[in-house]
Amino acid sequence: MFNTIIALVVFAAVSLIGWGIAEIKSKACGYEQNEDEKAYDDNLARQLHENGFHELSIKDVIKNISTKGFTTI
């Protein structure tokens, strides 16, 4: 019983330390696109919209997926 409590406390401590390191890393190591990457993304977005691409809303997604399941034969 006592070993289980110690294991849970150690697990929680290691988890919190790992979470803290991940948060610090995400704030310390930022990423910004350079001009070539921005130009490529803009070109790709323009091509997608020219070819008829449009982003679906949640209502469109619900219409297209099976939310009621399947019927048996």
Image (spheres, grey):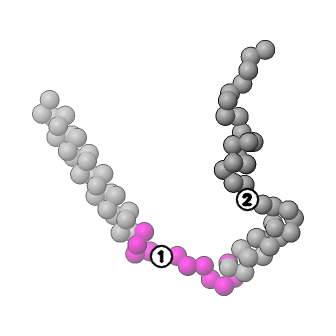
Q: Where residue 28 appears, x then y in whole percent?
A: 40, 75
For the residue marked with disc 2, what is the amino acid? Glu
Please check the rendered image and state whether residue 55 is part of the magenta-colored stretch, yes or no.
Answer: no
Circle 1 packing at 10 Å, graded few (<14), some (14-19), many (20+), is: few
Q: Which residue lies furthest to the right in this view?
A: 51
**Mark 2 or mark 1, which is nearer the start of the sequence?**
1
Which label is found at residue 58? none
Q: Residue furthest bottom?
A: 35
- Residue 63 location, quadrant: top right
For the residue marked with disc 1, what is the amino acid? Gly
Which residue occupies the foreground of this view, 21 or 38?
A: 38
- Residue 21 location, quadrant: bottom left
| Side (left or right) of 51 relative to 55 | right
Q: Where residue 52 appears, x then y in whole percent?
A: 85, 62
Whole-number angstrom distance, CA of label 1 to CA of label 2 = 28 Å
| Side (left or right) of 38 relative to 50 | left
Q: Where residue 26 appears, x then y in whole percent?
A: 42, 69
Dot 2 lies on which element?
Answer: loop
Dot 1 lies on which element?
Answer: loop
| Side (left or right) of 26 relative to 42 | left
Which residue occupies the foreground of this view, 68 or 43?
A: 68
Where does the magenta region start and end? 26-37
Q: Could you tell me how many numbered marks the image carries?
A: 2
Q: Residue furthest top?
A: 73
- Mark whose residue sits in front, 1 or 2: 2
Which residue is tagged 2? Answer: 55
Circle 2 packing at 10 Å, graded few (<14), some (14-19), many (20+), is: few
Which residue is found at the position 12% from the left and 33% from the top?
2
Q: Where residue 55 appears, x then y in whole percent?
A: 73, 59
User: Against 28, is 12 above or below?
Assistant: above
Which residue is tagged 1? Answer: 30
